[in-house]
Structures are given as structure tokens and as C-alpha cells.
Amino acid sequence: MEFILGQALFLLFCFILSCFLIICTTRSRRKSFEAAATPPGPPRLPIIGNIHLVGKNPHHSFANLSKTYGPVMSLKFGSLNTVIITSPEAAREVLRTHDQVLSWRSSTNSIRSINHHEVSVAWLPPSSARWRYN
């Protein structure tokens, strides 16, 4: 009887400790993410982020979300942080001021697995000498 009680108390202690650690790490991540000056956006779910808000017609979902959070908003799809721009004026401003940052294309794992990102002009950053040569 004492052995079972000891195991139950140990499991309860482990459960409370793991809940405490999860809460502490999510709060610290949230504070560091918010400190990065990201645009406003809806609250996120722990694993899937905001992917549940998109639905079958993303353009309608983004238009509805922009009524609440403005023309520039931040969404998280899984582990990918995304900035959504829904107005032409904001898009013009972002493309004028951040053109070098936005011109880089991220290559997928399938492209990297066959080293296609090193030889194809489509995946080279525009600031590289190889892109200018081709």
C-alpha cells in the first residue's frame, strides 16, 4: 500500500513539475516573440498556431482578420511566423522599404536534398555574384 502511494505521489509531482515547466517556457517564448516588434495578430494555439483560422478560402479569412488586426498582421502556421499584408498601400510601402529582404527565396528541403539550391538561378539570392553572372 505504501509503495503504491509513493508511486502516485511521485507521478503527481512529475505532472505538476512538467506543467510548471511548460507554462514557464511558453511565457518566455511569447515575451521574446512579442519583443521582436511583430505586427498584431490573433492568439495562437500551441502546436498549429493560426492555421485553424485560414479555412478553405484564405483570401476571405485574411480579409476578415484584417478588419480586426489591421492591414498588416502576424500569423503563425505551425512553426512558421508569417506576416500577411492585405492592403495595396501597405504592400507598396513594404516592397519599397524591404525589397532586399523580401527578394530572397527560401529553398525547401527537397530542393536542398539534391543540391539544386546551389546551381539553380531561381534559388540564388539576388545579392550573390553567381546570380549577377547568370
Image (cartoon, helix red, strand yellow):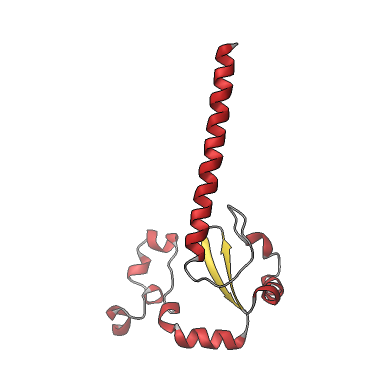
Q: Quadrant of the N terminus?
A: top right
Q: Is residue 119 left or right of residue 20?
A: left
Give the image location of residue 38, x and y in percent. 52, 71
| Viewer-closest of 111 and 48 | 48
In this picture, residue 59 sits left or right of residue 117: right
- Residue 126 lies, with reference to residue 9, above or below; the image says below
Is 8 rendered above or below residue 67? above
Question: Which quadrant: the C terminus?
Answer: bottom left
Horizontal relation, residue 100 to residue 71: left or right: left
Where is residue 95 shown, x and y percent of the image?
49, 85
**Which residue is located at x 53 percent, y 52 percent?**
26
Q: Which residue is drawn at 62% across and 79% down?
A: 71
Q: In this view, does 65 lie above or below 29?
A: below
Quadrant hosting residue 57: bottom right
Q: Residue at x 59, y 58 (%)?
A: 49
Number of residue marks = 0
Q: Which residue is drawn at 45% across and 63% down?
A: 108
Residue 112 image position (x, y, % from top left): 38, 62
- Provide residue 101's location: percent of width, then percent of height: 42, 78
From the viewer's perspective, tell me whether residue 110 is left or right of residue 14.
left
The outermost residue toward the top is 1
Depth check, front residue: 56 or 52 = 52
Q: In which quarter of the image is residue 110?
A: bottom left
